[in-house]
Image (cartoon, rainbow, N blue to C red):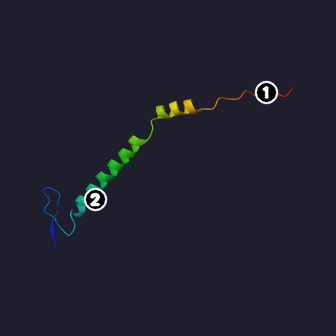
Amino acid sequence: MLHSCSFPCCETRTLSTYCWEHELLIRNETEAERENASVRDRPLSRELAGLNATTAQPELPTTRPA
């Protein structure tokens, strides 16, 4: 059964909740939000540098054979 798209002020008739145009719009917004969330979860370069500095192994002195 056809009904109007659930997006505000859209009169397009559709079988699903949203018309194709608004379905794509919502999908793109959702993907952008996920990408932004994953970027926020990654450590910053200064955080990586601090992490590398605290976990770095001390260099062993090189000895020359006598």
Three-letter code for the amino acid on which mark 2 is drawn? Leu
Quadrant location of the C terminus in the rendered image: top right
Tell me the element at label 1: loop
Q: Residue at x 51, y 30 (%)?
A: 50
Tell me the element at label 2: helix
- Dividing the picture into quadrants, the one containing residue 22 is bottom left
In this rendering, is residue 2 above or below 6?
Answer: below
Q: Residue at x 45, y 35 (%)?
A: 44
User: Outermost residue toward the right?
Assistant: 66
Q: Residue at x 38, y 41 (%)?
A: 40
Q: At which x and y percent is residue 59?
A: 67, 29
Q: At which x and y percent is residue 3?
A: 14, 68
Quadrant location of the N terminus in the rendered image: bottom left
Give the residue number, with chain letter if any, for mark 1.
Answer: 63
* Image depth: mark 1 or mark 2 in front: 1
In this rendering, is residue 8 above or below 43?
Answer: below
Three-letter code for the amino acid on which mark 1 is drawn? Thr
**Horizontal placement of 18 versus 63: left or right?**
left
Q: Earlier in the sequence, mark 1 or mark 2?
A: 2
- Dividing the picture into quadrants, the one containing residue 43 is top left
Q: Assess disc 2: are there few (<14), some (14-19) or many (≥20) residues with their C-alpha within 10 Å of its C-alpha.
A: few
Q: At which x and y percent is residue 46?
A: 47, 31
- Dividing the picture into quadrants, the one containing residue 18 is bottom left
User: Outermost residue toward the bottom?
Assistant: 1
**Horizontal placement of 2 versus 42: left or right?**
left
User: In terms of depth relative to the viewer, which is nearer, 56 or 45?
Assistant: 56
User: In terms of depth relative to the viewer, which is nearer, 4 or 55?
Assistant: 55
Contact (Cβ within 8 Å) of mark 1 with mark 2: no
The label number, if any, that marks residue 24 in the structure image: 2
In this rendering, is residue 9 above or below 53?
Answer: below
